[in-house]
Image (cartoon, rainbow, N blue to C red):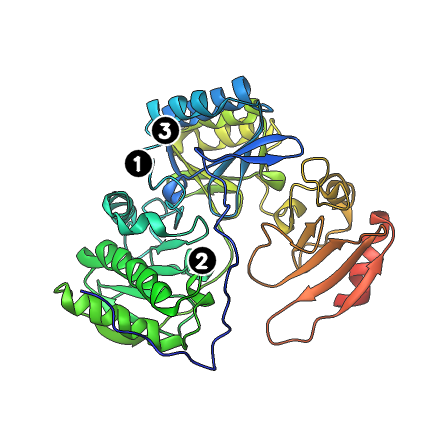
Amino acid sequence: MPTPALRSSPQATAVSRDRGDACPGTLRLHAADDGALARVRVPGGVLTVRQAEALADAAERLGDGDLHLTSRGNVQLRGLEDGCGGELARLLDAAGLLPSRGHERVRNIVASPLSGLDGQGVRDVRPWLTALDEALCASEAAQDLSGRFLFALDDGRGDVAGLGADVTVRAAADGGAQLGVGAAGEALRVLADEAARAALIAAETFLEAARASGTRVWRVDELDLSDGELLDAVGRRLTAEGIRHERRSRETGRTDGPPPGVVGAGLSVHVPLGRLSARQWRELTYVAAGELRLTPWRGVVLPTPGTHAEVSLARLAATGLVTDPHSPWLHVGACIGRPGCAKSQADVRTDAAGALGAIGPHGLPLYWSGCERRCGRPRGDRVDVVAAPGGGYRLSTAVPGREPRTTTMNDPARLAAALAAITS
């Protein structure tokens, strides 16, 4: 059933893209300064050990040997050789990582990584994850979603509900589910068994609204609509599909992930700057009991028997993975920087690592960017550290509801003084 035309609203900030979505995937590689780049979608961050081994094999045979985690729990392979696209696709297809060639860039789904492991969520979201991914790959319309469109499946604890997804499904204490679109302050309450189907309908409704607007947009919040208008359209589609729903106020989410250490029936580790060597990756697959769960906070959760948890944690720490919940690495992120990106003004990863000692345990997280695009910048309170064209960095606080405070820093060794100037 087509969605009725939606009227423009002065409350929204319209965005019209003047080009197609160039977001990389596994079938369409991106040419970077350090070689070709592939972005492998991993719905919910969930990998079987076999799939993880296939990714390590691809990184070693075709790329720079490392595996790079993204802020959506996906994996990037960098430094890929020219002309390797066909072999890469065959490797991933054989491992079950390419179930639909027409949907490989749109399988962007984050899910609560501790769901079903620590007893903290309202329900295990794994059935939703499986159902949504299957429905997404079966939808012809969904192929038109951009590679930036994001689904979030939250088990009720609020962790991925705060990540700014385009469509969010959150388990509710009453046994149902909240369906949210974009930043709308309200949600639609649906039955839990209908949640995955409702999420896909919401995405298809967005596509219809985008076509009706006559503009090219990639994300829900780029539509020139007020918060409630798209939600109304989703409600009409749900009614037409026989899915009962009620409008409810929407619960707020957080922006933090699981701390490192033993968590219920699993282990959690943080990956400094999201970059894993093949050795670290293989240690993770060795310790994992059947699967790995990559998190949107550049970490990995391993469901594993509790009897050997501390021994396994020590083994992972010996490879350089972060297992200490007080590590300053938990408060530092960075884009790829030089030499991987031609637009970067600095080797931000080296500078971030060199200034690690200046990071306090209770200060704002830092995100280092090589240019004003600030690729991979996380949501939530932070200090943006952006490389300046003439050298040095500009630091600015990013805290919703507060005026940003800004300073400059010519030398990363002076990070502590620069942070004190804007956060004290």
The residue where tag 1 is placed is 100
Quadrant of the frame with the C terminus: bottom right
Q: Are marks 3 and 1 in contact (CB under 8 Å)?
A: no
Question: Label 1 is placed on what type of residue?
Answer: Ser
Front position among marks 2 and 3: 2
- Percent from the top left, x then y, of residue 79? 60, 27
Closer to us: 18 or 157: 18
> Which secondary structure, mark 3?
loop
- Percent from the top left, x then y, of residue 414? 86, 52
Residue under the point 78% across and 41% down: 354
Name which of mark 3 and mark 1 comes first in the sequence.
1
Closer to us: 338 or 214: 214
Extreme residue toward the left, this view: 242
Name which of mark 1 and mark 2 comes first in the sequence.
1
> Which secondary structure, mark 2?
loop
Question: Label 3 is placed on what type of residue?
Answer: Ala
The residue where tag 3 is placed is 289
Q: Is residue 55 above or below residue 46?
A: above
Question: Label 2 is placed on what type of residue?
Answer: Trp
The residue where tag 2 is placed is 218
Q: Report whether 99 appears left or right of 345.
A: left
Specify few, some or many for label 3: CA neighbours under 10 Å numbering under 14, 14-19, or 20 or more.
some
Instruction: State the CA–CA distance, disc 3 to disc 1.
Output: 27 Å
Q: Is residue 414 above or below residue 35?
A: below
Specify few, some or many for label 1: CA neighbours under 10 Å numbering under 14, 14-19, or 20 or more.
some
Name which of mark 2 and mark 3 comes first in the sequence.
2
- For residue 223, say whether it is visible: yes
- For residue 244, say whether it is visible: no
Instruction: State the CA–CA distance, disc 2 to disc 3.
Output: 37 Å
Extreme residue toward the top, this view: 61
